[in-house]
Image (cartoon, grey):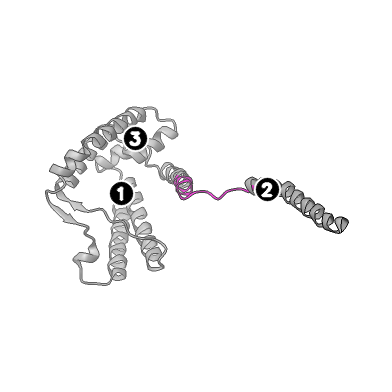
Amino acid sequence: MSTTTEKPNDTAATDTASHDTTAPHAKNDHDKQPKPLSAAGRSLALGVLFGIVFGFLLQKGGVAKFHVLIGQLLLEDFTVVKVMLSAVVVGMLGIHTLHRADMVEFHIKPTRLASNVIGGLLFGCGFALSAYCPGTGAAALGQGNFDAIAMMVGMVAGSYIFAEASSWISRNLDPIGDKGKLTLFDLFPQSRTAVTVGSASLLVIVLIVLELTTIR
């Protein structure tokens, strides 16, 4: 009886030992498996990718050059307007299509007249004085135009001041002329597709007229 009762104990001990020795290996193998990127990491990676593509297209479109940007402000070179309107048309149709397919959601900024007008004037003054905006300035610096450094420094300083004053702006400026989240679809009693296609068609006509009547 003693021999028959001890064997199961030995077997159980052996089984326990085997489980104890294999469990750490399984855990280590699980730890070695690559972990999927987090949502924040994926968004960051996509931001870097699309930022590089955006900068490349800005540079190839010629809108990172000082004389091209100044020419637009002097109404002598309409390259910037053509590039921007082309991007608006493509983006408008693409985002509308993705939204219809439930692949993206709209995140509409509110229309606040005082903040929008003052911000637009400040942006325009900075653009006129430096001949660069944030996107074109970064592309210009990337292609070796070191005069864009001053604009980049001013942009960082302005962003810091805006962040510090954001609470005051939200209390005192944002309520003036606050119209909520307005879109053309809200202003015209048509379907969203009709408004999108109609707006894109008008912009294409403007592009054709600019191409036929301007030098560049």
Does the magenta-highlighted stretch encompass residue 34?
yes
Q: Residues within 10 Å of mark 3 (few under 14, many from 20)?
A: some
How far is mark 3 from mark 2, CA to CA?
Answer: 56 Å
Q: Is residue 7 left or right of residue 116?
A: right
Q: Residues within 10 Å of mark 1 (few under 14, many from 20)?
A: some
Q: Is residue 20 magenta?
A: no
Foreground: 136 or 185?
Answer: 185
Q: Is residue 32 above or below residue 1?
A: above
Give residue 197's position: percent from left, percent from top: 32, 67
User: Can you identify the residue that label 1 sits on?
Assistant: 81
- Can you say whether 96 is above or below 76 in the image? below
**Viewer can see residue 171:** yes
How busy is the neighbourhood of tag 2: few (under 14 within 10 Å), some, or many (20 plus)? few
Residue depth check, mark 3 versus mark 2: number of the one nearer the observer: 2
Which residue is at 16% across, 47% downward?
Answer: 174
Q: Return the disc, 1 or 3, that comes first in the chain's sequence.
A: 3
Looking at the image, is mark 3 or mark 2 earlier in the sequence?
2
Disc 2 versus disc 1: distance between alpha carbons? Answer: 57 Å
Residue under label 2: 29
Q: Amino acid at mark 3?
A: Phe
Instruction: List x then y, in percent, for residue 172.
Output: 13, 42
**Residue 149 % position (x, y):** 36, 28
Secondary element under disc 3, as helix, strand or loop, is helix
Residue extent of the magenta highlight: 33-47
Residue drawn at x 38%, y 58% as measured from the top left? 90
Circle 2 SS class? helix
| Residue for badge 3 | 66
As helix, strand or loop, the secondary structure at mark 1 comes to helix
Using the image, determine if residue 171 lies above or below residue 91: above
